[in-house]
Amino acid sequence: MSEQSAAKQSRLLRGVHKTVTGLNPVLESLLAGVVGLLIGAILMYIWGFNPWQAYIALFKGAFGDSYGWASSIARGTPLVLTALTFSICLRAGMFNIGAEGQMMIGAMASVSIALFTLPSGIHTIVGLLIAASAGAIWSIVPAILKITRGVSEVISTIMFNWISRFLVIWLGVYVLVDPIRAEKTLSIPVAARFPVIVRGTDLTASVFMAVGVALIIYFVLWHTTVGYEVRAAGLNPTAARYGGIRNKRTMILAFLLGGATAGLAGAALVMGLPPSYAIFSSGMPNLTNMGFDGMAVAMVGRNHPIGILLAALFFGGLNAGGRMMQLGSNAVPLEMVRVVMGAIVLAMSIPELIRLFPAIKKSIENFAGRIRDRRERRAVKEAGE
Amino acid sequence: MTSEKLNTSTVESNAGYFLRGEKMTKVYSDGTVALKEASIEIHTHEIIGLLGENGAGKTTFTKILSGLLPPTSGRVLSPKGPVRFSSPREALDFGIGMVHQHFALVGTFTATQNVALSHERPFTRVQLARAEESLKALMEESGLHVPLDVPIEKLAVGEQQRVEILKVLSRDVDLLILDEPTSVLTPLEVDELFTLLDRLRSEGKSIILITHKLKEVQSVTDRVVVLRHGQLVGDVPTEQATTEQLAQLMVGQALDQDAGAVELSDQELPVHKERKPVDRTANSVLHVESLTSRSNTGDIAIENLSFDVFGGEIFGIAGVEGNGQTELVESLTGLRVPIQGSATINGTNILGVDPRHIYKLGVAHIPEDRWELGLVLPFTLAENAILGVHQWEEFKGPLSFLRWGKINTHVRALMDRFEIRAAGPSAPAKSLSGGNQQKLIVGRELAKDPAIIVASQPTRGLDIGAAKYIRDLLVEMRDMGRAILLVSADLDEVLALADRIAIMYEGRFMTVCSPDDLNREQIGLLMGGVEREEARV
């Protein structure tokens, strides 16, 4: 290969690198979305459904009319907040898997405002404050375990998820239980509820809170010294230390911030979820998995608050539209939506795979070259003899 | 021994050479052309010096020659056939061994275990007794002696290097490639190494010595190969080349007086003779008294150090790396809490104080490791330019908002003042070249308007131009009356810049004096731990 053609080829490779990896995270996430939908389609086809019809039903249900949009946004709202939890901690260099538990604690904490009355508006704010602080306080223990004892936050937050789940069930069954309907907790008083924005849907004003929090987190991370320190410590703790940044402090701070947003997600799921405005203790259908789905949203949203807003809308749409997919003659089970979500998360690793291509190519070339060399070496030897 | 350029070549021309590289070209996947049609013939009984600046292609050259990196075009031949391997192990089997700057040794293993490890195939029984036996025989034969029952991490760097060389020799190699072997050694150890290389040559081995020190090339090699920007620009018998010629080949054009002197004169660096008398009766800027610190492993790393650094002087600390320099710098810059002693800057205590408070006292710290300590590589230029000063009033508005407008203005000023070549304030720091990264750090630190500059290995890994620029800046700061603590493993740099030098060995100062009070031999002995009284003899 001449030098010129080699340079040309390397330029080409670099071009591939730029479009599919590194340069354009938006493209990468879109690609992952498409691949996820494709995998879902293949599975549907294997199981005898018509994927085309199913997806039309899904997207019509999600974004076809104002009702669909409202439902999608409503389902995306808590995901924004739990995704922020994961992202803030990731930016600080930690894997906080505890959004699920922190969100549940926040949700149950917000139920407690049913025990007293306050003027409307103030009551909502108090509810949010209680939920946020509960989430934050709940996240302190894993944070302290990490910085004092070196306990991996991955392990401790997963364990805390189970502790929170059963603590919340216990509170819902024995403490904050609705005396009239024992299957659910007390309902949030009318004065404290987020008002419904689109009548007939469950889209409430909690979406403004979620978007507001995302914007605040964006400004904190990229426009304040606090966020600067968190990001520096996450990317290079040694250099952060050199820069006078107290890494333990930024860790605690990131955990507290993350816990607070998870708590707010819990509040949004109770104070902003008509018609019951309460938690159903058996199985907690409105809460379960909202923390874990948030991690998927964070990944697709590339751990950036703005990206998270878009990704949450997409995942909310999948959830909302998935219900429409179950109707009619081509009734695809709702579980297929979760398959698609899982496939999307897996597809997020495609850029990494593409990055591997040159390496694979190189090793093949190397192997071929060695076989050639061996032949030549043998020829030389024979000639010598 | 011939050294003509080779143009014709056939595999059949059997004897006379051990390895032949023909028009080797390497283009990396990012488009970098690291090597352009370089041809070379390596003979037995020969030591070749490979000269070149940083980034001249020395590493690529040796990697291709040793068959570990397939060339984009061209080929490497030996009388035994083409040379191409997929692992260092295969290369070793073939008879090519390389000793890297960073040793590939298991720290908790002994020398015997390390050598045995390099012989083992997967899933076979380790035969330690036999390995020890053959290693002893090899030590006898080669004259290289190392303790066999001590873990590698307890050995001195020079001894570790010997283990690495033994490891390669034990594989019975014909070509030994040494990558900057002397950078970690004391002058005495360098002499021993060269004696060994001599002996290996007489046994018929070929040796490639990668270096940037001209004196070494002239003292030990038979032939010098010079690379510049990926091109082989010189291949001459050593005795026919003058230092001036080699330096010129290496850097390409005649440098201005100062920079030319960098590689030419006996001192190798311009001595800043215009040293101004320093008033050492006034109060010192940095006052350190009986400072004692532990290393990360818990051993005493520096012991009872006491010294002063005055305004208007460069206090240079020389010594082989790993003798406590890192711990000393860390103790003075808030990164390590000493166990005893005191240190003050203009009367204010700095021991155990957080770095951000120390910076406020007027301390600038140019760290030894710019990727680990000095920069957050994925951060932008602007973000890196405020590391450590991000909490200062000028960059921080109400509600601790960062004033990006002011920061960007500040960064542009830094880029102008310190000749940092980058796309702009929002370019990621990792996209900068090493020299520009170091200029960014130096610029950030000097912009603190410091009373004292702690500069640790400030020019390591930089090309001559960038190194000279940074040395000049340090001298400029000294002439402005700032105090400078310079720690460097580059003895020539310390001798050229410092007004006073301390030689550090095992956590202690062997001596503190003017650089003119000692000759290089004495310094070498002191660096090797020989007391001054003995050193005089």
Image (cartoon, rainbow, N blue to C red):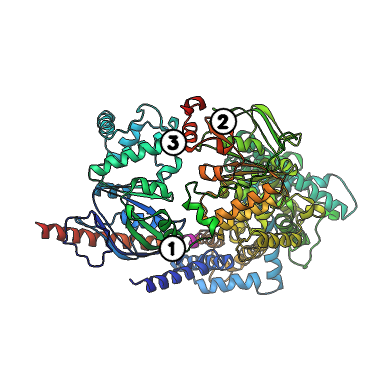
Position above or below: A277 against A337: above
Residue wearing tag 1: B229
Q: Which is more N-terminal, label 3 or label 1?
A: 3
Question: Which is in the foreground here, disc 2 or disc 3?
Answer: 2
Residue A309 placed where, x, y %?
Answer: 67, 63
Q: Is residue B352 visible?
A: no
Q: Nearer the viewer, residue B495 or A120?
A: B495
Helix, strand, or loop for circle 2?
Answer: strand
Q: Which is more N-terminal, label 3 or label 2?
A: 3
Q: Farthest residue in the left direction?
A: A385
Q: Amino acid at mark 2?
A: Thr
Q: Nearer the viewer, residue B254 or B131?
A: B254
Helix, strand, or loop for circle 3?
Answer: helix
Residue wearing tag 2: B511
Q: Amino acid at mark 3?
A: Val
CB atoms at circles 1 and 3 under 8 Å apart? no
Chain under numbered label 1: B
Instruction: Residue B59: give its label.
Output: none
Q: How crowded is the residue under tag 1: few (<14 C-alpha within 10 Å), some, or many (20+)?
A: many
Direction from residue B140 to residue A304 in the image, left or right: right
Residue B303 placed where, x, y %?
Answer: 59, 27
Residue wearing tag 3: B157
Q: Quadrant of residue B276?
A: top right
Q: Quadrant of residue A157?
A: top right
Q: Amino acid at mark 1?
A: His
Q: Find the distance from the CA under tag 1 to the CA under tag 3.
A: 31 Å
Position above or below: B430 against B216: below
Magenta-highlighted stretch: main secondary structure? helix
Q: Find the distance from the CA under tag 2 to the CA under tag 3.
A: 22 Å
Q: Which residues are magenta?
A: A349-355
Q: Find the distance from the CA under tag 1 to the CA under tag 2.
A: 41 Å
